[in-house]
Amino acid sequence: MKTLASLLLISASLIGTTAYAQDAQTNSLTRAQVVAELQAAKAAGQLSVGELDYPIAISQTRSLSREQVVAELAAAKAAGQLSVGELDYPIASSHPSTVTRAEVVAELYAAKAAGQLSEPEA
């Protein structure tokens, strides 16, 4: 019985190793291509070498001046797209509601009658 269990365990481990080796062989890159990609990544600064250069600094694709950033901030505030503090939270929508108060109250009563809302516990 122990021999049978040992044989099954050994055969299962060999099958798993073979399947892993086949997956590794399906990669279509050659060693030269991998080395070229590594050198390109090092040249672009995308590869860290040790702890001193971690995390890798990401190069900025946009270079805005301070004045341009301040102008974008002022435009976002003027358009109501930016919350400043707790007093103006939540941000008012630029699309006002078309539903009247009476319609909202009617929907509330209908939802309560249908059992879709639960009453808060006192």
Image (cartoon, grey):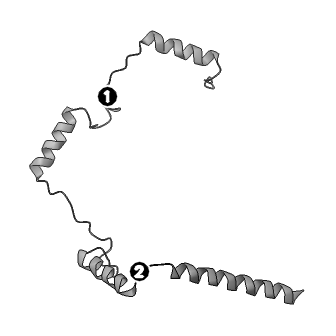
Residue 30 position (above or below residue 71): below
- Callout 2 secondary element: loop
Question: Residue sitting at 58 percent across and 14 percent down?
Answer: 110
- Callout 1 secondary element: loop
Identity, as a three-letter code, of the amino acid under mark 1: Ala
Q: Residues within 10 Å of mark 2 (few under 14, many from 20)?
A: few
Question: Residue sitting at 13 percent across and 54 percent down?
Answer: 64
Q: Nearer the viewer, mark 1 or mark 2?
A: 2
- In this orientation, which residue lies closer to the viewer: 1 or 67? 1
**Residue 21 on image: x %, y %:** 57, 83
Q: Give the quarter of the image for residue 109.
A: top right
Label whose residue precedes the other's in the sequence (1 or 2):
2
Q: Is residue 5 left or right of residue 31?
A: right
Instruction: Say the numbered circle drawn on residue 110.
Output: none
Question: Residue sitting at 25 percent across and 32 percent down?
Answer: 80
Identity, as a three-letter code, of the amino acid under mark 2: Leu
Residue most toward the top? 102
Q: Give the quarter of the image for residue 54.
A: bottom left
**Residue 76 on image: x %, y %:** 21, 38
Q: Is residue 57 left or right of residue 6?
A: left
- In this orientation, which residue lies closer to the viewer: 63 or 8? 8
- In this orientation, which residue lies closer to the viewer: 29 or 59? 29
Question: Residue sitting at 59 percent across and 19 percent down?
Answer: 111
- The residue that mark 1 highlights is 92
Q: CA distance from mark 1 to mark 2?
A: 54 Å
- The residue that mark 2 highlights is 29
Q: Residues within 10 Å of mark 1 (few under 14, many from 20)?
A: few
**Residue 56 on image: x %, y %:** 30, 71
Residue 12 position (above or below residue 83): below
